[in-house]
Image (cartoon, rainbow, N blue to C red):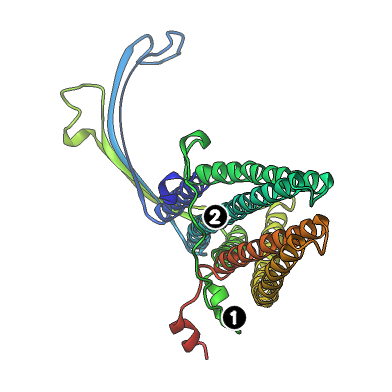
């Protein structure tokens, strides 16, 4: 599946795990720390000490201790830091959903385009067969002396030109096949998709979609969470104006003799608070606060832009689907008329009323109209897939009813 094979999704997943780990680090800062240490040192005092009783002596010191430290979050600095990193993790989760949705939409669009090319290729192959029969008819008429040599040449030109168009579809089809392979995490040479007829049903798109559906867009959710994260960073910066209070405690055993290390006389302990306050920083904290405010303003602008872009993307694809539906109806009529024109002109040619150039003209028009009809279907399918992506995953009848 895309979740375990698409590299962009895997990248977003790794970044999400990084963000989760950062949030866990911020959460850990709210709790006390406990460290254990053990040491043994040997030292020699200098002999030049005047009146020293330990001059020149070699002394062993052994120590085993536990130390604990806890920063008491009086001003909310640590809590706001946790709030910021948690919102950042939520933004990364939304980024992961966006990467997954984007890969799915791109896969659907590429697949639809590939199947449209298959339909184009089938249409061209059928046309080549029809043109080959027309060439045979023209040759027979030329052999019978009722057609000119130019008719044969025109029929051959038409046939070869259409064969070339059929072959040319293979270039774009190969590129789409390779793109699909990369999307599912395979080498382009490892995937081969057999041609099949294009058999799809266009989804019914409601005339109006509630704006609440945009709230599901993962990019909008990510932008909102980044704004929340940046807002929390303002609190972190402002908390730096106040002193920090740390409570420390420690205790253990210290002795020069290994046998006396874990005895009552060797015990020691200490406990007490420590208050730290920056007196002068040359405007550092003020600049950090201004930076945090500016960063928040930037994320708010990004959030608003994401919402506006979401509305535009939805409206663009709704308009495309509506207009393409109308165009498809008209194009179907054009195809029907072109087929009728080919039948009439071919009969006129057989009766000697018109020249073969008239047949070539109407056949070319028919092929062009049929290819256009298939192309419109492909554009409608791609627009539908893009609309699903724009809405953060599509829509349901229940959601539409609830929004009324």
Residue nearer the viewer, 399 or 367: 367
Dot in front, 2 or 1: 2
| Residue under pointer 1 | 211
Note whether residue 312 is visible. no
Q: Which mark is residue 316?
A: none
Residue nearer the viewer, 99 or 41: 99
Q: Quadrant of residue 250?
A: top left
| Residue under pointer 2 | 115
Q: Residue furthest bottom?
A: 404
Q: In this view, does 315 lie to the left or right of 105?
A: right
Q: Where is residue 33 in the image (x, y as percent from the top left)?
A: 36, 47
Q: Is residue 99 left or right of residue 293?
A: left
Residue nearer the viewer, 361 or 11: 361
Classify mark 1: helix, strand or loop: helix
Classify mark 2: helix, strand or loop: helix
Q: Is residue 93 left or right of residue 270?
A: right
Note whether residue 339 is visible. yes
Looking at the image, is 222 positioned above or below residue 58? Answer: below
Question: Spatial distance from mark 2 to mark 1, Cα to Cα?
Answer: 32 Å
Return the disc, 2 or 1, that comes first in the chain's sequence. Answer: 2
Q: In this view, does 132 lie to the left or right of 272?
A: right
* Residue at 68% from the left image edge and 55% from the top image edge: 288
Q: Position of residue 21 (x, y in %)?
A: 43, 49
């Amino acid at each position: 599946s895309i979740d375990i094979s698409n590299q962009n999704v895997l990248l977003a997943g790794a970044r999400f795990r990084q963000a989760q780990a950062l949030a866990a680090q911020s959460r850990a800062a709210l709790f006390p720390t406990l460290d254990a240490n053990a040491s043994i040192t040997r030292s020699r005092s200098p002999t030049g000490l005047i009146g020293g009783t330990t001059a020149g002596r070699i002394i062993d010191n052994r120590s085993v201790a536990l130390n604990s430290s806890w920063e008491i979050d009086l001003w909310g600095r640590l809590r706001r830091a946790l709030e910021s990193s948690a919102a950042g993790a939520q933004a990364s989760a939304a980024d992961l959903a966006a990467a997954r949705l984007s890969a799915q939409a791109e896969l659907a669009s590429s697949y639809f385009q590939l199947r449209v090319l298959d339909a184009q290729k089938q249409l061209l192959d059928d046309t080549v067969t029809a043109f080959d029969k027309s060439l045979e008819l023209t040759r027979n008429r030329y052999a019978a002396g009722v057609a000119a040599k130019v008719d044969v040449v025109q029929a051959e030109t038409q046939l070869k030109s259409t064969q070339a168009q059929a072959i040319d579809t293979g270039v774009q089809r190969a590129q789409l096949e390779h793109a699909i392979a990369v999307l599912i995490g395979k080498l382009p040479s490892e995937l081969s998709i057999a041609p099949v007829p294009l058999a799809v049903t266009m989804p019914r798109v409601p005339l109006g979609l509630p704006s609440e559906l945009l709230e599901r867009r993962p990019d909008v959710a990510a932008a909102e969470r980044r704004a929340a994260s940046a807002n929390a960073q303002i609190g972190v910066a402002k908390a730096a104006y106040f002193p920090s209070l740390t409570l420390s405690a420690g205790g253990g055993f210290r002795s020069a003799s290994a046998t006396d290390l874990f005895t009552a006389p060797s015990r020691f302990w200490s406990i007490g608070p420590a208050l730290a306050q920056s007196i002068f920083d040359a405007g550092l904290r003020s600049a950090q606060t201004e930076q945090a405010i500016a960063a928040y303003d930037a994320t708010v602008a990004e959030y608003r832009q994401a919402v506006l872009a979401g509305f535009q993307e939805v409206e663009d694809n709704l308009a495309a689907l509506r207009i393409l539906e109308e165009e498809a109806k008209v194009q179907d009529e054009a195809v029907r008329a072109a087929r009728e024109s080919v039948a009439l002109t071919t009969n006129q040619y057989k009766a000697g009323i018109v020249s073969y150039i008239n047949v070539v003209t109407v056949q070319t028009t028919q092929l062009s109209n049929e290819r256009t009809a298939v192309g419109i279907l492909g554009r409608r399918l791609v627009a539908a897939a893009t609309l699903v992506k724009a809405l953060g995953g599509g829509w349901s009848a229940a959601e539409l009813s609830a929004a009324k």
